[in-house]
Structure formats: structure tokens, C-alpha cells
Image (spheres, rainbow, N blue to C red):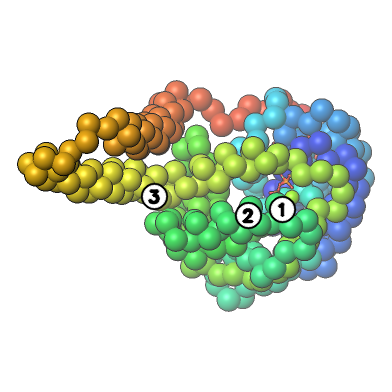
Amino acid sequence: MLSIVIPIYNEEGLIDDLVKRTVSALEAFIDDYEIIFVEDGSEDQSLQYLLNWQNKNHNIKVLSLSKNFGHQAAFTAGLEYAAGEIVGMMDGDLQDPPELFGEMYRKITEENYDIISGTRSGRKGKSGRNIYTSLFHLLFRNVAVIQNMENTGNFSMMKREAVDALLTMKEKVRYLPGLRSFIGFKQGYVEFVRDERSEGDPKMSLSKLFILAADAIFAFSRFPIKMCLYLGLIGTIVFMFAGIYVLIAKIFGFAVIGWSSTLLSIYFLGSIQLVSLGVVGEYVYRIYKESQNRPIYFVKKFYDGNRAK
Ligand code: UDP
Ligand code: MG
């Protein structure tokens, strides 16, 4: 069986389109499938829309979370409930074309890949957000300890073994595309052009996107710590030379007792220290999050169609 996991947060306007397109894309190549919609604490009628669809098509299942946990948590929940031998993941806003699942499935079953990720060869749509995403990928490519992740997102398909491996990683601060690359296995790619969202506003606010980017960088690179170190080193070198200059000036007697140099050095060192403290704080925060060991999500109800409860 093939399972597809789709997170949904306040998407009532596009659920009908989404279900129709996904179902027909899947039925084009497979009969035995389930679509798990993870309803991430929507405030609108999304859940009702999904349940209506479930009445018509028992391959549709709805996992309703107790509140909004964010889309990485929603994906995780869906992966844990997915029963298929092969599992696909896709955003619910039709930016990723469900028609590509056929190609992903073929690569996994015929070419023996374990994981297929969609890579975005381009993007349509509003530029501000896209520039932001490109900047993140540029930075991430240069600093991250994992490779070949550029321009991949959540759109992907995995074999059961890979899904189980992914789910053994219980970290609370999750960046799934990174974790997916980290686990290894035979990884393949299919290219696509990322579409504009088909309806409504993005449900990941810019601040949520920013936090996701920070999570990715802190979890998969040493960049922040290194940056502190370099800043500190630069500071040390600059002020070593400044110190030598001051000494020479003193010895040859042309020292002007000025406050500008003093003030400058205080500003400079102070700012380096503040930046470094902030970075250390980010790590402490993440350690704290992990040590709390709270569940990543809570399920309100799993509507699983076939099985009567
Ligand atoms: N989403 C979610 N919980 C959230 C935010 C978003 O489940 O807190 C879902 C949303 O409904 C969509 C997917 O995650 O199906 C991607 O969201 P969005 O399109 O806003 O993100 P972007 O395309 O900017 O990455
Ligand atoms: Mg989107």
C-alpha cells in the first residue's frame, strides 16, 4: 500500500481541489492507497470538508490534532500513522504537483531507490518570499554538514525502512528535509517547478519560516558557533594591533589621551560578546526543548474510515 501524508492548516478554500487532484493522480497508477490528512488545529471548516470527502472515499483518513503544532510536527504525526509500505509527503496547498507521485513511485519500485525527493528547478509566484527561500538555501548549502539538500523540501516519497529510520529520530526541534537526508539510504531526485499556492495566503507566516530556517541551520551545521569564534578572533587580532599601536605611541610620547579609541573598543567587543551570547542562548534553548521531552503533537481523533471504531 502507498500512504500519502498531507498537513492541513486553515485550507478550507482549496481542499476540494486538493483532494480531487491528489486522488486522480494516485488512481492513475495504484489502487491500494491511503491519503492521511493531518488537520493541524485549523480554526476554519477544514476538518468538516475533509470528513465530507472521507464519506465519499474510504481511502481518505483524517488525523485531527489537538491544536496547531506547526507543519513539521503535522508531517511527523502523519508519518507515524501511515501504514503503507511506501509513504509520500506533500504540502496541502498544491505548490507541489501530486501528479509527480507516479514518477516517484516508479523510481522507488523499479529503480530501487529508497528515498525520492522533489527538487525545485524553479519557482513561480511572488518574489519576496522566493528570494527569502533562495537565500536560506544558499546559506544552508554552504554551511550544512549534510549534502545534496539544496532546493528540496517536504515533497518526497520513502520506503518503509527509511520512514522507520526517520521516525526513530525523536528530536523535538525538527527539520524533516534535513533528517531525511541525514539517514542515508539510496536517495534519488525528481525535478519540478514549484507552483504558486493555489488559493489563500501562506499558512507559514514569515516568522514561522524564519524559525524553520533557524532550526535547520542550528540542527545541521556548526555555522553559528563558528561565526562567534571568527568574530572573536577578528576582534582579538584588531585589538592586538591597536594595543601595539597604543604602546608605541606611549613610548614615543605622541599618545593623545582620547576617549574615542576606548569607546570604540568597548562597542566592538561588547557587540561581539552580545552576538555570541545570543548564539549560545539559542543552543541552550534547544537543549532545554529536547530535555523537556514533551511529545511533538497530541491527537484529538483519528478518523480512519474503514475500521469502525
Ligand atoms: N501547515 C500546517 N501547520 C502550520 C502551517 C502550515 O499544517 O502551522 C500546512 C499548510 O496547510 C500547508 C503546508 O503546511 O499544507 C505548507 O504551508 P505553506 O504553504 O503556508 O508553507 P510554504 O509553502 O510557505 O512553505
Ligand atoms: Mg506553500
**Mark 2 closeness class: few <14, some 14–19, many ≥20 residues within 10 Å:** some
- First in sequence: mark 2 or mark 3? 2
Give the class, few, some or many, for how many residues have Cα within 10 Å of label 3's Cα (few <14, many ≥20): some
Q: Would you say residue 187 is visible in this rendering? A: yes
Tell me the distance, in whole angstroms, between the alpha carbons under discs 2 and 1.
9 Å
Mark 1 or mark 3: which is in front?
1
Q: Residue 307's x, y, as percent?
A: 77, 37
| Amino acid type, callout 2 | Thr
Secondary structure at numbered mark 1: helix
- Based on the displayed image, in which of its 4 quarters is residue 113 positioned? bottom right
Asked which quadrant contains residue 74, the reply is top right
- Distance between the alpha carbons at the discs numbered 1 and 3: 25 Å
Residue furthest out toward the left: 251
Give the numbered dot on residue 133: 2
Q: Residue placed at 44% from the left, 43% from the top?
A: 218
Residue for badge 1: 128
- The residue depicted at 59 percent of the width and 69 percent of the height is 189
Q: Circle 3 sits in a helix, a strand or a loop, which is it? A: helix
Mark positioned earlier in the residue sequence (1 or 3): 1
- Residue 216 drawn at (x, y percent): 50, 47
Q: In the image, what residue occupies the spot 73% across and 67% down?
A: 193
Marked residue nearer the N-terminal end (2 or 1): 1
Q: Is residue 57 visible?
A: no
Question: Mark 1: few, some, or many residues within 10 Å (few <14, many ≥20)?
Answer: few
Q: Amino acid at mark 3?
A: Phe
Quick check: is the Cβ at mark 2 less than 8 Å away from ligand 1? yes
Q: How many marks?
A: 3
Q: Quadrant of the C terminus?
A: top right
Horizontal side, residue 260 vs residue 28: left or right: left
Q: Which residue is mark 3?
A: 223
The amino acid at mark 1 is Gly
